[in-house]
């Protein structure tokens, strides 16, 4: 396994950062190199809003479900799926865009994720650490108001970056045999493997928390997903012009 | 700029591969290291179907819009956003999942993209090249039938991997100043920058094609997006249980 794979394999979410600032030039290099991620038909349908204003970071921390590291991290980025720029490109050529399709929504969301993951990898390669903030979708309209995010643009997630004060050990992932299938989607033997993985995750939590937490993976999933997650998202996206037709 | 950033910055889509096979152990290492990508609440809501069957690859090449490299590449992967496994996890704990929400759709789609991008980076780090195949969404129901992809799982994109026979130069990306904004989403000066980028892309195509092609970026975008892309996606996703409520 080479150094890049070792780097990928060492990823953990970092939520505690030292006071050390991130060099501006380095941040720009990280983002610029990451922009070479694949993009559907070269649409590059994303915009990153970097939050420098400390009051805005404080508000974003609250709006994201009271996650203090959003306020405390040296670099906070809001990743937006962006059709606004594409509309401008169409207008420049006397065309109009069909922005309200499910397909364009998927293209823009995937484009945004690919660039973001490159940024995470590039950041980690220079000793930074970070965490994605899905909580940015807790109150997306308030965040759009705060950051003046226009129609046909939506905040997909945030990302905290900085020099790690503390890094945890990696959390075990699903076994390869569960996530990689051959030629067909077969579920033969999956339940048995899930039970083994449940035990693995339970042991991981026990060790990490001195036996205070011991839930399995499937318990965590069931607890998380039995409730409807962020039920406002459909109406929010519709109001931003993502009608998913 | 370190080696990882240089690697990211050198990304180009590779569609021509040598006959050299990819070592199975190496492929597994690539995927296993990539599994450490961030994932919403550790749901890991993706499954990768690796297509070994040559007849299936041929059919997939046709279904993806007649892209011959899908058939010819040494490794073809279909990346699926997967709620099926999560449903099983819930069942194991006597709960049911709210699979039909827009939010869960976003979580699973983003999870899939983050892992895929790690795989692309890991593959490139060992000298492989590849290309994402969004065309997998051209005929998604046929692909689900072919690969027996169940309810609550959808194919997001494919990926060809192999040793490059030919690599192109990188295609210029949007300037950093367009994709990175500070504190608010401001579009001041964007149009002027888009025009400069248009010229850059036009020059790039002229050079790459010996003056046979000279379209600008915004022209390409307008031509691509004036038509509704993959208008079947909404009905397809609904039929697979992604009702986007």
Image (tube, coloured by chain):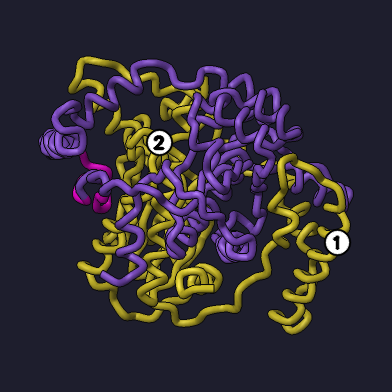
Chain colours: A yellow, B purple
Q: Is residue A229 above or below residue A189?
A: above
Q: Are marks 2 and 1 on the same chain?
A: yes
Q: Which residue is labeled 1 in the image?
A: A195
Q: Residue at left 40%, top 36%?
A: A40
Q: Which residue is labeled 2 in the image?
A: A40
Question: Which range is magenta?
Answer: B176-188
Q: Residue at left 74%, top 40%?
A: A184
Q: Residue at left 51%, top 24%?
A: A244
Camera-nearest residue between A115 and A54: A115
Q: Is residue B90 above or below residue B242?
A: below
- Does the magenta-highlighted stretch encompass residue B62? no
Helix, strand or loop at label 2? It is helix
Residue furthest toward the front?
Answer: B19
Estimate how packed mark 1 is, as few (under 14), some (14 to 19) or many (20 or more) residues with alpha carbons within 10 Å: some
Q: Quadrant of the N terminus of chain A?
A: bottom right
Camera-nearest residue between B44 and B132: B132
Q: Is residue A37 above or below residue B134?
A: below
Q: Quadrant of residue B42?
A: bottom right
Q: Could you say where residue B144 lies in the image, as x and y percent from the top left?
A: 69, 30
The residue mark sitting in front, 2 or 1, is 2
Helix, strand or loop at label 1? It is helix
- Does the magenta-highlighted stretch encompass residue B184? yes
Q: Residue at left 67%, top 54%?
A: B43
Q: Is residue B88 left or right of residue B15?
A: right
Camera-nearest residue between A124 and B96: A124
Tell whether label 1 touches label 2 (CB within 8 Å): no
Q: Is residue A107 visible?
A: yes
């Amino acid at each position: 396994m080479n150094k890049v794979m070792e780097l990928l394999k060492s990823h953990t979410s970092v939520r505690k950062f030292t006071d050390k600032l991130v060099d501006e030039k380095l941040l720009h290099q990280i983002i610029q190199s990451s922009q070479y991620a694949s993009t559907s038909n070269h649409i590059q349908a994303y915009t990153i809003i970097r939050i420098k204003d400390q009051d805005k970071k404080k508000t974003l921390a609250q709006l994201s479900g009271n996650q203090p590291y959003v306020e405390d991290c040296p670099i906070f980025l809001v990743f937006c799926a962006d059709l606004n720029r594409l509309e401008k490109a169409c207008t420049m050529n006397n065309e109009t865009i069909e922005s309200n399709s499910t397909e364009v929504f998927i293209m823009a969301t995937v484009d945004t994720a690919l660039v973001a993951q490159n940024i995470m990898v590039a950041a980690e390669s220079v000793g930074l650490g970070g965490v994605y903030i899905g909580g940015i979708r807790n109150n997306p309209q308030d965040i759009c108001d705060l950051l003046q995010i226009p129609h046909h643009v939506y905040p997909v997630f945030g990302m905290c970056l900085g020099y790690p004060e503390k890094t945890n050990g990696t959390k075990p992932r699903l076994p390869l045999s569960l996530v990689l299938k051959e030629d067909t989607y077969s579920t033969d033997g999956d339940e048995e493997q899930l039970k083994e993985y449940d035990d693995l995750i339970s042991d991981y939590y026990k060790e990490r928390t001195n036996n205070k937490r011991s839930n399995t993976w499937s318990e965590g999933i069931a607890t998380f997903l039995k409730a409807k997650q962020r039920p406002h998202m459909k109406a929010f996206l519709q109001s931003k012009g993502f009608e998913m037709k």
